[in-house]
Each structure stands twice: as C-alpha cells, then as structure tokens.
Amino acid sequence: MPHQPPSDGLTLHDISVRFGGLTALDGVSLRVPPGRTVGVIGPNGAGKTTLFNVVCGFVAPTSGQLTLDGRPLRPRPHQLKKRGIARTLQGVGLFPSLTVLENVLVGESDRDRAEAALERCGAASYRDEKPASLPYAIRKRVALARALVSDPRLLLLDEPAGGLGVQEIEELGELITGLSCSVLLVEHHMDLVMTVCDEILVLDFGKPVAHGTPEEIRTDEAVADAYLGAAA
Ligand SMILES: Nc1ncnc2c1ncn2[C@@H]1O[C@H](COP(=O)(O)OP(=O)(O)OP(=O)(O)O)[C@@H](O)[C@H]1O
C-alpha cells in the first residue's frame, strides 16, 4: 500500500520457547522476505504451531527477537491486522450465519476490496451463499480471501491443504505462488511445500535441523531419515 514504508519482511532471531521443563522452540532464526514463501515442516510436536503462535502473539518467546519490516514485533493477537499480519486457521473458521461476502467483510468495511479478494481466490460467484452450502475447498478459498482482504504484509498459512484433493491443492499452490506478501506456511502436504516454498525450515523437537531450498531439503540425508523418509 502506498502509505506503508518499504518492507523487508519478517525476521525471527534466535527464538526459544520453554513451557516449564519442555523446550518447544530452541534457537530458531528465520527470515521471510516480501514476496517469498517459507515453509516450516517437521514431525508432530516439532514446534511448528508454537512458531506460528509466537508470530501471532499467542505465545511469548522465552528469549530471542522478532521484527517485521525492521521494527520490533511484539504482537498482541488483536493488533495483528494493524501490524499487517493475517492468518488462516486449520480448518476454515467461517461464521455459518453470514454469507461468503459478509464473512470476508468481518473486520474490513470496504465492499469493493472484499469482492476483489473473493475474485482473486476464485470464490466471487459464491458471495451470497452461506458457508455450509459450499464444498469444503470453496470454504477454504473464502477463508483465504478473508485473510487477504486486509492486504497483509505477512500471511501465515496453517495447514491450508488439509482436507483438499490433488487438483484443489494444485490450484491453492498457484494462488500462494502469486502472492506478493511474505508467506509463512506450516503444512504436512509435502508436494505443496516443495512446490510453493522458496525456503524450508525443518524443525525436530524445537530445533532447526535443516534450512534451505526445496531441492536442498529434498536431498538432505538427515531430513530424509528423520522426516521425509518416515512420511513416504
Ligand atoms: N501451551 C503449551 N503448554 C505446554 N506445552 C505445549 C504448549 N503448546 C505446545 N506444547 C508442547 O510443545 C511442543 C511443540 O508443540 P507444537 O504444537 O508447536 O508442535 P507441532 O510441530 O505444531 O505439532 P503438530 O504437527 O502435531 O501440530 C509439543 O511437545 C507440545 O506438547
């Protein structure tokens, strides 16, 4: 947006989170520049959701710093939009009594922008429908439109491929690839991660065990042994 300062994306510097005696994140550093998509993968319990929750302000890091566009980020969950952060939830999280358009208009009063976001996500023709009457894949598109309507600097996608078929995941991948904001993606669906991510961070028991391009991650023996091999 024209009035916003130049953006250099999200930076996590040496973030650790401890819950009592359990270390959920252990020295995680990461940069998500504008227009880039960074995936976070790892086995169950690796710390992916905790990482998201740190960026959203649901969990305070025990140590380390976050910045967004060069400014310290100490997010409060209700101030995310103000800081240019949007997220989608696992599942869809739409309001059942509101129409598709009304769902996108929650927290965004500009109707033209809401319609444009629906258009961009391929869901404009469902604007007057209630979510319950729509296929799951369309509801996911609406949820994405709701996240994109505020034109975020940073979009957090939490398992966006969950419940989608092969074709729908491909279309989702095209949508993600076309985004101009920073995207942080947590996803178990490896094809999507490998297709849309510029970089991937692999966590295991909260520790970064690998960080690189999809090709580097695909050929990393430690990752293959610990995760990809196990998932194959
Ligand atoms: N609020 C909390 N209190 C205590 N322990 C927690 C809390 N949140 C997460 N944990 C623990 O932190 C570790 C990391 O959990 P997290 O949910 O971040 O992993 P994940 O990679 O997202 O797993 P999954 O793929 O199953 O969603 C786990 O051992 C989990 O039990």
Image (tube, rainbow, N blue to C red):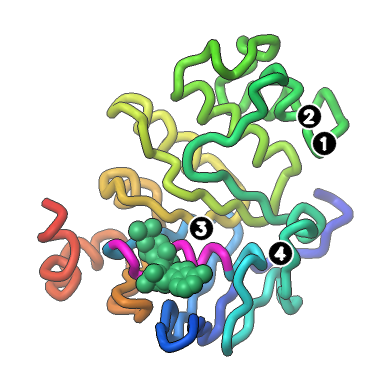
User: Residue under circle 1?
Assistant: 108
Between residue 131 and residue 193, name the one nearer to us.
131
Q: CA distance from mark 3 to mark 4?
A: 15 Å
Image coordinates of residue 167 in percent, x first then y, are 32, 25
The residue positioned 73% from the left and 75% from the top of the image is: 74
Tally the marks.
4
Q: Amino acid at mark 3?
A: Leu
User: Residue under circle 4?
Assistant: 7
Image coordinates of residue 126 in percent, x first then y, are 61, 12
Looking at the rendered image, the disc whose residue lies closer to the viewer, 3 or 4, is: 3
For marks 1 and 3, the one nearer the N-term is: 1
In the rendering, which numbered label is found on residue 105?
2
Residue 77, compared with residue 150, is above or below; it is below
Q: CA distance from mark 2 to mark 1?
A: 5 Å
Q: Give the magenta range.
A: 44-53
Q: Secondary structure at mark 2?
A: helix
Q: Amino acid at mark 1?
A: Glu
In the figure, residue 69 lies in which quadrant?
bottom right
- Residue 199 visible? The answer is no
Q: Tags 2 and 1 in contact by the CB under 8 Å rule?
A: yes
In the figure, residue 83 lies in which quadrant?
bottom right
For marks 3 and 2, the one nearer the N-term is: 2
Between residue 112 and residue 98, name the one nearer to us.
98
Looking at the rendered image, the disc whose residue lies closer to the viewer, 1 or 3, is: 1
Image coordinates of residue 33 in percent, x first then y, are 57, 64
The residue positioned 51% from the left and 58% from the top of the image is: 184
Outermost residue to the front: 20
Between residue 142 and residue 30, name the one nearer to us.
142
The residue positioned 62% from the left and 10% from the top of the image is: 125
Q: Is residue 57 magenta?
A: no
For marks 3 and 4, the one nearer the N-term is: 4
Q: Amino acid at mark 4?
A: Ser
